[in-house]
Amino acid sequence: PQTIEVVKTRARPMGLEVVVGNPWDELDAHDIFGVLVQYPGSGGTVRDPAPVIEKAHAMGALATVAADLLGLVLLKPPGEMGADIVIGSSQRFGVPMGYGGPHAAFFATREEHKRQTPGRIIGVSIDSEGKRALRMALQTREQHIRREKATSNICTAQVLLAVIAAMYAVYHGPDGIETIARRAHRMTQILVEGLKRLGIHVVTEAFFDTITVAVPGQARRIAAKARESRINLRVIDADHLGIAFDETTKRKDLRALWAVFATRAADKLDIAKIDAMAPECIPENLRRTSKYLTHQVFNFYHGETEMLRYLRWLAAKDIALDRSMIPLGSCTMKLNATTEMIPVTWRNFGAMHPFAPLDQTQGYQQLFEELEAMLSVLRCG
């Protein structure tokens, strides 16, 4: 839902009509120049986007897929299905939720569109001493600082989040990332099988780590009961609830969720037996077979000491405030105190879900109100 609202907001001043619907069935009824498909969908369903992409191309339109980065570890990449653009958030690669951000995005496109790509493309060049060097390719720095004409914003605050996600991938590597993804997926499979045994109808048949369950007329009552167990469920409507897992989910969370739906019967469920029997829930044609994170940097620094030394080596190559003035316009690192970075690691700040109920986010609300008051003084004083 939030993606739809953002698209509508950006499209309104440009005079563009946004049509929200089912692109698998309704694309032919509209004259379109582009289509955006969520993969997996908001309710957790993993559906093959290839038919939508093919139909969009037949209509002369571009096809964009908004994908779950961790889910793509197990799911067939949209690029292999013909997508022109693939976008998403890198939050799931080790970045705290932080009540909704900031998080670095990822953006991928086909070769023919690379010169229109927002963000920075870094290529290999040779410096004045003949040494191998990395620099911006295809674009100039000025392209990103032309105020309203800029194609993106080079912002240190955003780069820091990208560094966290990148180093998460470096430390875990392809095998570690796959282990994390498979664990989240398996926990969801066990949850679904247990719910079915409790007589709960699970709407989502193919999924990664998010499901929708049907509870006719009981959604708000069950969600309220879940909150008593310190669990937040998504109330989709009066009849449906959404449940999403991640790498932090534990077996005790499974039992707690089952108890929310059926208190007494849940005690009889054997997690080990269900784990041994729960079926695979990603269709075979949508399972990933291609390799990823193949560069050597993602396949070496998996020990604490190796990672520590690698980060120190990278830091030594950077221009930082602890050893120099920072040139150009890197205002974030010039003006922000080091102590402002520390709360990123605090669970009380970082673990807050962006859709948590207001009565659970009073600390953040206080911060917002105090910041507003300070800014009003600066503006009016």
Image: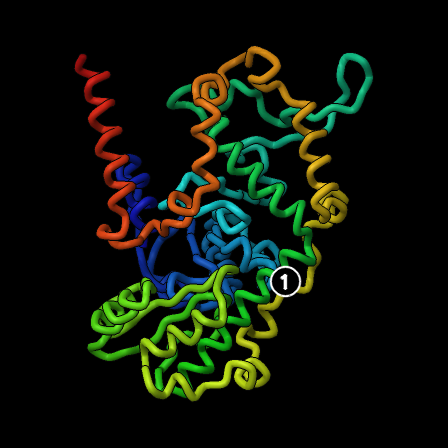
| 262 relative to 31, above or below | below
Q: Nearer the viewer, residue 34 or 332?
A: 332
Question: In this image, 370 relative to 129: left or right?
Answer: left
Q: Residues within 10 Å of mark 1 (few under 14, many from 20)?
A: some
If the image is split into quadrants, where does the C terminus sit? top left
- Residue hosting label 1: 179
Estimate the x, y position of residue 278 in percent, counting from the top left: 54, 82
Which one is nearer the viewer's eye here, 40 or 171?
Answer: 171
Give the residue drawn at x 31%, y 53%.
355
Is the image coloured rainbow, by chain, by secondary structure, or in one colour? rainbow
Position of the N terminus, as image quadrant, is bottom left
Task: Using the rendered image of the protein, determine whether residue 151 is visible from the camera's viewpoint.
Answer: no
* Left or right: 230 in relation to 146: left
Mark 1 residue type: Thr
Q: Quadrant of residue 77?
A: bottom right
Secondary structure under badge 1?
Answer: helix
Q: Is residue 318 left or right of residue 12?
A: right
